[in-house]
Image (cartoon, grey):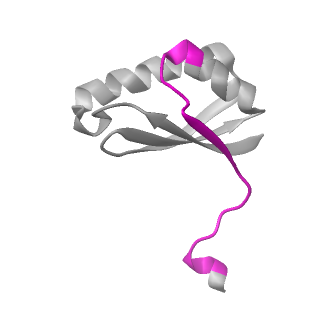
Amino acid sequence: MKRYMIERDIPQVGSMTGEELCGAAKTSNEALAALAPKVQWQHSYVTGDKTFCIYLAQDEDAIRAHADLSGFPATRITEVTGIIDPTTAG
């Protein structure tokens, strides 16, 4: 599977309560279950009006299918081709 970053434009997502985020995660999980094993959610970063989600998926079509089922937009889908962190420097 390939790793993708999905940018989602969701107005005021950063102002959602913990309960609202829980509901969003449940909705996402239901869509993921319907698409398994084609797509897996690793985690998301929530900002003011966007989320940045890291997914494993067989292809971009699986990401789009999740967006359609969950109702969460996939504004931009970018394949992650590598990961670096401070330990990459050796």
User: What stretch of residues is rendered in magenta?
Assistant: 68-88
Residue nearest the viewer, comparing 48 with 59 = 48
Name the spot of residue 81 as percent of width and height, x first.
Answer: 74, 56
Task: Specify whether 44 is left or right of 33.
Answer: left
* Residue in the picture at 33% in, 27% down: 22
Q: Looking at this view, is 82 or 23 the one in front?
A: 82
Total marks placed: 0
Q: Is residue 80 left or right of residue 16?
A: right
Residue in view at x 32 percent, y 29 percent:
21
Where 86 sits versus 15, above or below?
below
Q: Which quarter of the rendering shows the C terminus?
A: bottom right
Quarter assignment of residue 89? bottom right
Question: Which residue shows up at 65% across the image and 24% down it?
Answer: 64
Q: Is residue 24 left or right of residue 75?
A: left
Image position of 52 (left or right of 69): left
**Does the image show residue 16?**
yes
Q: Position of residue 42 (x, y in %)?
A: 56, 41
Residue ranking furthest to the bottom? 90
Q: Is residue 72 magenta?
A: yes
Picture quadrant where residue 19 is located? top left
Residue ID at (51%, 22%): 29
Which quarter of the image is occupied by the N terminus? Answer: top right
Instruction: Say whether residue 38 is visible.
Output: no
Residue 2 part of the magenta segment: no
Residue 25 image position (x, y, % from top left): 42, 26
Q: Compared to 9, does 66 lie above or below?
A: above
Image: 35 above or below 51: above
